[in-house]
């Protein structure tokens, strides 16, 4: 029996354990892969593709040695309570908070808002041709902010309208980052409730993320759940590695490609 147990340990358990340990260390500290589910990042990413995520970058951010940049494609978990953020595991049936794949549009300290489909960062409209050349951008505005007698009464998001008394917890950071209304808005709000496109000044460690699919209902992102804290960002999608080949109207082509930052987000 002793010989048999030694055989199991040396030939099976130890080797399997070593393989699992190496896999854990690689996926925790070196790289991992994430599958794209849905079309919220179309045309940049398509449903079913898999991306490479360098994990060492997340550790550098955690230790304050690196920062996420505008234009990077982030793997993140939306705030708890966000609509449609809970997924169900196939077959086994248990639910979990799914990872989202979105683009970082604005970083801590930036002023950001969306006016009729155009994203403004620090007062400049972003020329997002990598999106508009491929699909029609829905002319929505965000965030909606309503005032009465100079005081904020309601906020309007992709999800709907929320009075301050019924504000979901995940939207409270958004309210705290709203810039004060201008004098004209305050004056009009003295007569009646006045709703305008607000301005968000991102607090320390908060990021504004959006999907590239800007069509109607194309993406659930910061326009729904507000800015996200950097602790929610698990990494950056850097490279598409699967499927290796795809077939389109031009035939079969190689699908391997990097995910660089588009010129629109290089404001500095």
Image (tube, helix red, strand yellow):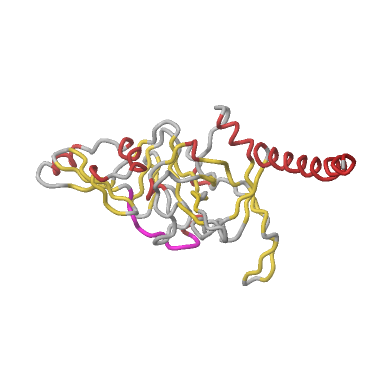
Q: Nearer the viewer, residue 166 or 108?
A: 166
Q: Nearer the viewer, residue 57 or 95?
A: 95
- Residue 169 coordinates in the image, percent (x, y): 34, 41
Residue 168 shown left or right of residue 150 in the figure: right
Q: Residue furthest left?
A: 191
The quarter of the picture where residue 28 lies is: top right
- Camera sees residue 232: yes
Q: In the rendered image of this protein, does residue 248 appear above or below residue 50?
A: below
- Residue 20 coordinates in the image, percent (x, y): 73, 43
Q: Nearer the viewer, residue 132 or 20?
A: 20
Q: In the rendered image of this protein, does residue 43 appear above or below residue 208?
A: below
Give the dominant element type of the magenta stretch: helix, strand or loop. Answer: loop
- Residue 250 coordinates in the image, percent (x, y): 65, 70
Q: Dividing the image into 4 quarters, which one contains the N terminus? A: top right
Q: Residue furthest top?
A: 64
Residue 136 forms part of the magenta stretch: yes
Residue 227 forms part of the magenta stretch: no
- Camera sees residue 46: no
Residue 218 shown left or right of residue 53 in the figure: left
The quarter of the picture where residue 107 lies is: top left
Picture residue at 42% right of the left edge, 31% below the top: 204
Residue 18 shown left or right of residue 228 in the figure: right
Picture residue at 54% right of the left edge, 33% below the top: 67
Q: How many marks?
A: 0
- Residue 75 coordinates in the image, percent (x, y): 54, 46
* Part of the protein shown in magenta: 133-142
Q: Residue furthest right?
A: 3
Picture residue at 63% right of the left edge, 55% below the top: 50
Picture residue at 32% right of the left edge, 52% below the top: 141
């Amino acid at each position: 029996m002793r010989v048999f147990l030694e055989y199991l340990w040396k030939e099976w358990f130890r080797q399997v354990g070593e393989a699992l340990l190496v896999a854990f260390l690689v996926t925790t500290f070196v790289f991992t892969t994430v599958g794209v589910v849905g079309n919220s990042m179309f045309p940049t990413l398509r449903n079913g593709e898999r991306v490479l995520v360098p994990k060492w970058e997340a550790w550098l951010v955690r230790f304050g040695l690196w920062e996420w940049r505008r234009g990077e494609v982030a793997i993140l978990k939306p705030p708890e309570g966000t609509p449609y953020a809970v997924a169900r595991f196939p077959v086994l049936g248990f639910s979990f908070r799914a990872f989202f794949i979105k683009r970082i549009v604005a970083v801590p300290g930036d002023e950001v808002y969306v006016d009729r489909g155009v994203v403004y960062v620090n007062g400049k409209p972003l020329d997002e041709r990598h999106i508009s050349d491929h699909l029609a951008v829905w002319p929505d505005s965000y965030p909606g902010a309503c005032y009465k007698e100079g005081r904020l009464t309601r906020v309007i998001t992709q999800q709907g309208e929320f009075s301050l008394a019924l504000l979901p917890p995940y939207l409270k950071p958004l309210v705290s980052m709203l810039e004060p209304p201008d004098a004209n808005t305050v004056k009009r709000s003295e007569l009646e409730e006045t709703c305008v496109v607000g301005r968000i000044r991102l607090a320390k460690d908060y990021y504004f993320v959006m999907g590239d699919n800007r069509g109607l209902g194309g993406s659930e992102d910061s326009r729904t759940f507000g800015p996200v804290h950097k602790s929610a960002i698990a990494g950056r999608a850097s490279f598409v590695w699967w499927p290796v080949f795809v077939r389109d109207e031009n035939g079969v082509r190689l699908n391997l490609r990097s995910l660089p930052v588009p010129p629109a987000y290089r404001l500095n």
